[in-house]
Image (tube, rainbow, N blue to C red):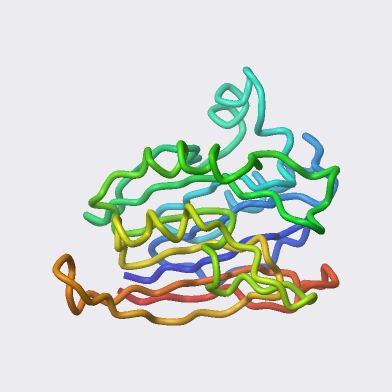
Amino acid sequence: MIIDCISDLHGYYPELEGGDLLIVAGDLTATHSMEEFLIFCKWIDEQKYRKAVVIGGNHDEFLIGEDTQMIVNTMLPTVYLCDSGTESDGLKIWGSPWTNTFDGINPHCTAFTGDEELLASKFALIPDDIDILVTHGPPQGILDKTRRGTHVGSIELLAHLTRIRPLLHIYGHIHEGYGQIEHTWDGPHGTGRMMRYVNCSHVNEHYEPVNKPIRIVL
């Protein structure tokens, strides 16, 4: 199964290779406007994947409100997840757009953000048997270091990952954290199970679209 992962597009829409599953982990536009969201919808409709999954991010204000579901159902030609799940080729996928606030976060871009107490309630909704977890923000200490040298990921997200132990955790948000690492769980639950963390931010810390989508083959 070929999975391409990308996040933090911020108005840049590259041509992708195509495959089985495309995952877009939030921050879809540059101006947070409905007009640019329509451009994103057209872009993702043109990509050559059997299935695409999208979540929101802290820049995606237009995805908050009573009309959100009508908007995505009408305009987005793919699967939109917000504290909800889907399946692809037998793999269970869960999407959560929530990120923790921290010193230095853009005060004008706070969609789906909150303190760790709020995030704990959101991440508690994630079932135990998820294979692919898609969040906008990173867990504490894992591909989450800013250019100031500070780890700003969520402590609650890290705690829930020890419960869920998915095969893949895909996210973005911290542009400087782009990359992937593997981790093997030990202990009585899931000993020897390998997990891959993927920060797939398309832009770097200067909002330049220099990072390629990350391809995973399962």
Image side of residue 218 versus residue 76, left or right: left
The mark tally for this picture is: 0
In the image: residue 200, left or right of residue 159: right
Residue at 26%, 56% (x, y): give it. 91
Q: Is residue 191 left or right of residue 208?
A: left
Look at 18% across and 68% down and name the residue there.
Answer: 190
Residue 6 locus on image (x, y percent): 58, 65
- Image coordinates of residue 158 in percent, x first then y, are 45, 61
In the shown orientation, is residue 191 left or right of residue 152?
left
Q: Is residue 156 above or below residue 77?
A: below
Give the residue at the far top of this rendering.
66
Q: Choose between 120 and 85: the one closer to the eye.
A: 120
Residue 152 placed where, x, y %?
65, 64
Q: Pick out the residue farthest to the left.
A: 188
Quadrant assignment for the C terminus: bottom left
| Rendered-image quadrant of the N terminus | bottom left
Q: Which residue is painted at 66% across and 33% down in the image? A: 63
Residue visible at 71% across and 42% down? 60
Residue 79 position within the rendered picture, expressed as x and y whole percent measured from the top left: 46, 42
- Residue 102 quadrant: bottom right
Residue 8, by quadrant, is bottom right
Examine the rendered structure and indicate whether residue 31 appears above or below residue 143.
Answer: above
In depth, the one of 183 and 1 nearer the eye is 183
